Image: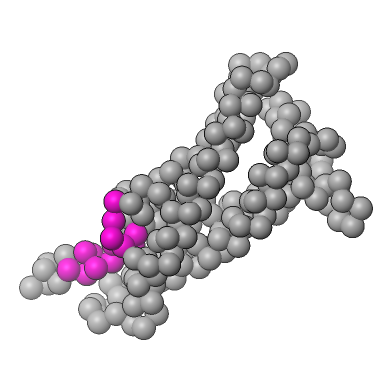
Amino acid sequence: MKTLNGKTRLAFLAFFGSHILATLCIDMQAFLGQSQFVTYPQVLQDLLSWYCDLFHDQLMKPPQYDNWFRAIVCCEIIFQLPFFFVACYMIWNSTLTTSTATDTGIDTPTSESRSTYTAGSGWFKSACMVYGTHTATTLIPILACHIFDNEGATVIQKVGVVSIYLPYLIFPLWLVYIACANENIFGERERQQNSTKKKS
């Protein structure tokens, strides 16, 4: 859990992959739903309305949205969405190179795996820290509104909507912890050293 390896890597891959769908299909409606130039499919509009009614999510309930919330969604679209694709590529690529090296027994890393490892201690690590801190910060007022200002919602609805938003706070904070606690977020060098010791 201290590096993007094993089950932790798969968890983040699933998180970012699902976040792409959530942003494109649901969250963007809060920013583009009122646009005269963009019309979302009726099935996605109905899905959003059903979710808002079920969990009493007043922030996402169409057609009117608070400007501060739309600003946060705008940041999600402009800054976070591109990072989701980059993160999926980096994590998936790292998974492939690691499994290939393990199955074949080759200790010499390929140029692709070397590039991934370098990014894990360089630009991608920095991008993870920026994304994590930014996202966690935006979730604080959102969660506060659902907990303290969500009038008319039952306790079960509040627990439900907070449970839905909570992973978007936990995973970014988790990513910041991984980036701060490790020289390389993939931890591949340590794994390769341990593998070499076992073979010897």
Residue 97 on image: x %, y %: 37, 74
- Report the magenta residues as a range: 181-193
The total number of labels drawn is 0
Residue 55 on image: x %, y %: 68, 27
Residue 91 on image: x %, y %: 44, 64
Q: Is residue 151 left or right of residue 102?
A: right
Q: Is residue 4 left or right of residue 168?
A: left
Quarter of the image where one finds residue 197? bottom left
**Is 110 above or below relative to 136?**
below
140 vs 44, nearest the viewer:
140
Residue at image location 25% in from the left, 82% down from the top: 108
Residue at image location 71% in from the left, 26% down from the top: 56
Residue at image location 53% in from the left, 65% down from the top: 86
Residue 33 on image: x %, y %: 83, 47
Residue at image location 51% in from the left, 53% down from the top: 131
The coloring applied to the image is one colour
Q: Is residue 192 left or right of residue 159?
A: left
| Quarter of the figure with the C terminus | bottom left
89 vs 134, nearest the viewer:
134
Q: Is residue 89 left or right of residue 125?
A: right
Residue 58 visible (yes or no)? yes
**Is 196 above or below relative to 159?**
below
23 vs 7, nearest the viewer:
23
Residue 23 visible (yes or no)? no
**Residue found at the far left of this picture:** 200
**Is 147 above or below relative to 94?**
above
